[in-house]
């Protein structure tokens, strides 16, 4: 047993899956769920994801050894500000948010004396949301990045690392700004592009046809992630603004280069462009 009392604030896909994975691993005694969505919270109890529920975060965290916050990234600091008067001395607060630099600095500044904040980001997910979408294998074999800041000490980082390892994840650690620049490229840009593609095609007017009705495997595979929660992605775009803008600029330059080669009927250039991309893609699957 690693911890006696775990409070999960935001019992959705990530929070619910974390709770289920830890229970299955036998490393947590009692799990308290907190969520602003009453129906989702009741579902998390009826599904056995948590042992008890509270609609009040302040009382929900009382007596907790560890608090895991898995709400949209723009709300994480507000949650910490709300619960801080009730955090027991020695408590470890951690999160699963997809953006780290702003979250870690805001939460570090809000930690009461004796409490530690350890930023975290599991590199696992689906396009579905809520407790009903949670499953305990979500993190198995997937990376989890920890981004310890000013209040994280060796013991708190070790505890969070052991919890994610028990949940099946492969844990690494890095500086939060470095994390945000990497995930702007490999996660936030692809979501932005998928949403943009569906937006562009969905509003395209080709002689009055509903173009989307002709979509098949390729379009659907490529755009699966555009079915993700819009509020979650609004928050990620705003919280990782600078890094995402730089990634979008890089992507726009690549798209402009492709356009130039098509416009010039540059057969060799197009073959080289597509071959290079295919080699990168083949290398990751
Ligand atoms: N979905 C993914 O693929 C994925 C992957 C890695 C990290 N994340 C991160 O995990 C976090 C949660 O994402 P998710 O996919 O589990 O979302 P989700 O919508 O499935 O769950 C979030 C839950 O938080 C609740 N909530 C929202 N604001 C709240 C508040 N102020 N107090 C208490 N509860 C609140 C919602 O009612 C919801 O049940 C986000 O920060 C996201 O960036 C998501």
Image (spheres, helix red, strand yellow):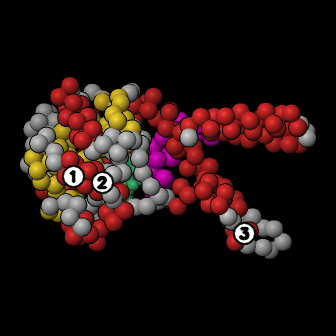
Report the side of 196 relative to 26 (left or right).
right
Q: What's the distance in space between the residues labelled 3 and 1, CA to CA?
A: 44 Å
Q: Quadrant of ligand 1?
A: bottom left
Report crowding for label 3: few under 14, some 14 to 19, many 20 or more residues within 10 A (C-alpha): few
Residue corresponding to mark 3: 214
- Residue 92, disc: none
The disc, 3 or 2, on the residue closer to the chain's N-terminal end is: 2
Give x and y (percent) for residue 191: 55, 50
- Residue 24, disc: 1
Give x and y (percent) for residue 185: 55, 37
Q: Residue at x 71, y 61 (%)?
A: 201
Give x and y (percent) for residue 207: 84, 71
Q: Vertical placement of 38 versus 170: above or below? A: below
Q: Is mark 2 within 8 Å of ligand 1?
A: no
Report the side of 141 relative to 90 (left or right).
right
Q: What's the distance in space between the residues labelled 2 and 1, CA to CA?
A: 7 Å
Q: Residue at x 58, y 46 (%)?
A: 190
Q: Is residue 240 magenta?
A: yes
Q: Is residue 265 magenta?
A: no
Q: Vertical placement of 136 versus 150: above or below? A: below
Q: Contact, CB < 8 Å: mark 2 with mark 1?
A: yes
Report the side of 59 relative to 243 (left or right).
left
Q: Residue at x 53, y 55 (%)?
A: 225
Q: Residue at x 21, y 26 (%)?
A: 153
Residue 77 in sight here: no
Q: Nearer the viewer, mark 3 or mark 2?
A: 2
Q: Secondary structure at mark 3?
A: helix
> What range of the chain is rendered magenta?
231-250
Q: Is mark 1 within 8 Å of ligand 1?
A: no
Residue corresponding to mark 2: 136
Q: Is mark 3 within 8 Å of ligand 1?
A: no
């Amino acid at each position: 047993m690693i911890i006696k009392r775990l409070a999960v604030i935001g019992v959705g896909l990530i929070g619910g899956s974390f709770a289920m994975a830890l229970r299955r691993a036998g490393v947590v005694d009692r799990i308290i769920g907190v969520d602003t969505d009453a129906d989702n919270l009741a579902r998390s109890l009826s599904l056995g994801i948590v042992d008890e529920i509270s609609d009040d975060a302040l009382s929900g965290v009382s007596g907790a050894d560890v608090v895991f916050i898995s709400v949209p990234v723009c709300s994480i600091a507000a949650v910490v500000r709300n619960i801080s008067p009730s955090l027991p001395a020695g408590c470890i607060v951690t999160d699963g948010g997809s953006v780290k630099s702003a979250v870690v600095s805001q939460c570090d500044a809000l930690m009461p004396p004796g409490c530690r904040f350890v930023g975290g980001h599991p590199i696992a997910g689906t396009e579905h949301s809520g407790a009903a979408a949670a499953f305990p294998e979500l993190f198995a074999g997937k990376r989890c990045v920890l981004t310890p800041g000013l209040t994280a000490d060796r013991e708190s980082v070790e505890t969070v690392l052991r919890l994610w390892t028990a949940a099946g994840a492969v844990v690494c650690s890095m500086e939060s700004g470095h994390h945000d620049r990497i995930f702007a490229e490999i996660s936030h840009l692809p979501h932005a592009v998928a949403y943009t593609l569906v937006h562009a095609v969905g509003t395209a007017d080709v002689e009055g046809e509903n173009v989307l009705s002709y979509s098949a495997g390729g379009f659907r595979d490529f755009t699966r992630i555009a079915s993700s929660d819009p509020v979650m992605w609004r928050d990620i775009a705003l919280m990782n603004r600078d890094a995402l803008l730089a990634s979008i600029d890089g992507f726009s330059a690549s798209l402009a280069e492709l356009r130039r080669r098509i416009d010039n009927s540059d057969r060799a250039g197009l073959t080289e462009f597509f071959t290079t991309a295919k080699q990168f893609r083949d290398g990751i699957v």
